[in-house]
Image (cartoon, grey):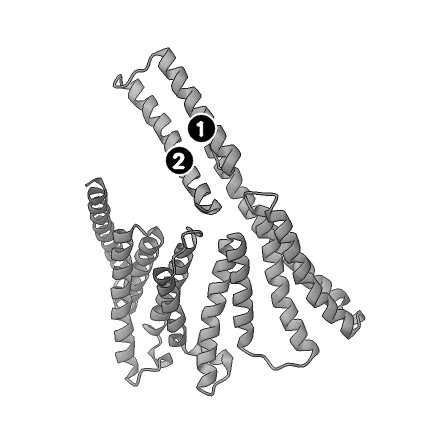
Amino acid sequence: MSEASGKKEAQERVDRIQAFRREQEQLAGEGILILTEEQRAQLDAHLNKTLAELAARFDVDVSDSQKQISLAMRIASALGGLALCAAVVLFFYRYWGLLSTSFQVGILIAIPILLLLAMDLVSRKEQTLYYTSLLGIVAFASFILNLNAVGFIYNMAPSPNAFLAWGLFALVLGYSYRLRLQVAAGLVLLAFYLATDFVVLRGSSFDAVFGRPETFLPGALALLATPLILRHSKYPGFPMVYRLFGLAFVFLVLLVLSNWGQLSYLPFAKKTIEGIYQMSGFAVAAGAIWTGFRHRWTESINLGSGFFAIFLFNRLFVWWWDWMPKYLFFLIIGIIALILLAVFRRFRAASAKREAA
């Protein structure tokens, strides 16, 4: 079992113990399960020992307050990393012109290497990876800045290959130190690389990718397919990242093209293209919800539900806003929201029934 998987299972067991204690207290208050003082003492001693062992071995959160503190630490780690990134960028702008070219190149090479060495050293000393994540953010930002600076120094033309280099670097950081934020950044950059490479091969400038949303679909589909093909037994949280960003890219492309069909490569009339992508948006959102319920993928359910509502309300706005009284429009929106709530509740009940069976 990997360290990341072990910590995840340890945290789940801690949560089960806390839920058991709350349920036991509830049952005792209702007079259903009453333990003697000796039994209660033995139970508490065993549970406290188990929690202490899990906390010592995996550094898990054994109380709600610790979970809140851990969340605050993750936020502080991200903010600290962004602040240090800003410090590095401002340092470059402040003193860069005073340095010789050879010294500039030396600094650009040394900074990412030093940060990687610091990450490796820190990761060996901590289990929570807060400081490792902070250094990873700075290392990633420095690598992006360094490639841009090298291109400026040697007057190199902008290239979509930069997205490939940045994305691979982020993935190496993420997989080496189990950092989901870096993995997410790497996946987004690789999706951009595939899209920009496609428009360049068609003879356009790589920044034309933003005018052709369909170029993001191959990368999005690759993200969705990767966790189905490659097992992530050592990285249990990574498949969720692939699905989340793969679906996000697909939904955003469908949403844009359902309103601006002229941006599509399809050789049809604008209204026809928009109609195709409108129906595709509803179908993909419904499929994401159904697949999420079937495989217990929470991110798929949430994202599919959110975009299904967005597609629906977007269509209702386009169809009815200009001619319908505003109070009636919002009344219908409220009724539809209640219907959707009832439908999702039935889905939830069916899922609970299936799990109980």
At horizontal 31% and vertical 65% (from top left) the residue drawn is: 314
State the quadrant of the C terminus.
top left
Answer with mark 1 or mark 2, whichever residue precedes in sequence.
Answer: 2
- Seen as rendered, the residue at the extreme top is 37
Q: Is residue 254 visible?
A: yes
The crowd level at tag 2 (other Cα within 10 Å; few <14, some 14-19, many 20+) is some
Q: CA distance from mark 1 to mark 2?
A: 10 Å
Using the rendered view, name the quadrant where residue 232 is placed: bottom left
Q: Position of residue 96 (x, y in %)?
A: 75, 69
Residue of label 1? 50
State the quadrant of the N terminus.
top left
Q: Secondary structure at mark 1?
A: helix
Query: Nearest the camera: 336 or 91?
Result: 91
Query: What type is the residue that disc 2 sits on?
Result: Arg
The crowd level at tag 1 (other Cα within 10 Å; few <14, some 14-19, many 20+) is some
Q: Position of residue 353 (x, y in %)?
A: 19, 42
Q: Position of residue 328 (x, y in %)?
A: 24, 58
Q: Secondary structure at mark 2?
A: helix
Q: Is residue 79 visible?
A: no
Using the rendered view, name the quadrant where residue 6 is placed: top left
- Does residue 188 appear left or right of residue 324 in this picture? right
Q: Position of residue 323 (x, y in %)?
A: 26, 68
Q: How many marks?
A: 2
Residue of label 2? 13
Residue 57 sits above or below residue 139 on the image:
above
Query: What type is the residue that disc 1 sits on?
Result: Thr
Q: Are marks 1 and 2 in contact (CB under 8 Å)?
A: yes
